[in-house]
Amino acid sequence: MHDRCLKAWVTGRVQGVGFRAATRDQALTAGVTGYARNLPDGRVEVLLCGESSAVDRVVRWLWQGPPASRVTHVECEQAEDPPPGTFELG
């Protein structure tokens, strides 16, 4: 069941540092589906769908990221995207 879908754009040193894979691990642990994909402008776009508390937990983690990353900004908005059945990397 997906209570909520949220799209986030993560800015900083977030490409080439394992950010997407670590985001997938956090999402799967929280029971959240969605995706994480690199954008041409250097950001990572993340879709998170799941129970509100689980989505919020992953969003809080996005501000931290994996050890090699350096997150400077996370912008979020509600998403109308259909929730995927798993968490995908793109």
Image: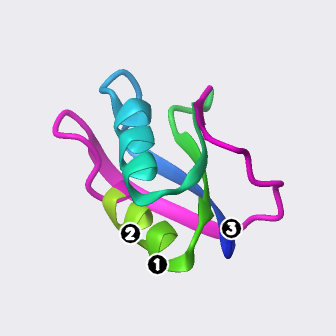
Query: Where, quadrant-wise, is the C terminus in this rendering?
Result: top right
| Residue at x 51%, y 32% (from the top left corner) | 42
Q: Residue furthest front?
A: 1
Task: Pinpoint residue 22: horizontal percent, then vertical percent.
Answer: 34, 37
In this rendering, position of residue 61 left or right of residue 4? left
Scheme of colours in the image: rainbow
**Secondary structure state at the residue bearing disc 3:** loop
Q: Is residue 68 magenta?
A: yes
Q: Are marks 1 and 2 in contact (CB under 8 Å)?
A: yes
- 63 and 53: which is toward the camera: 53
Q: How many marks?
A: 3
Task: Pinpoint residue 77: horizontal percent, then vertical percent.
Answer: 66, 69
Q: Name the mark on residue 1.
A: 3
Real-space CA distance between mark 1 and mark 2, rounded to the nearest whole angstrom: 6 Å
Q: Name the mark on residue 53.
A: 1
- 37 and 48: which is toward the camera: 48
Does label 2 or label 3 sit earlier along the sequence?
3
**Secondary structure state at the residue bearing disc 2:** helix
Query: Picture quarter containing residue 15?
Result: top left
Which residues make up the magenta segment? Answer: 62-90
Task: Pinpoint residue 49: horizontal percent, then vertical percent.
Answer: 63, 60
Residue under pointer 2: 57
Q: Is residue 52 magenta?
A: no
Does label 1 or label 3 sit earlier along the sequence?
3
Crowd tier of the residue under label 2, counting other residues whose Cα lies within 10 Å: few below 14, some 14–19, many 20 or above:
some
**Secondary structure state at the residue bearing disc 1:** helix
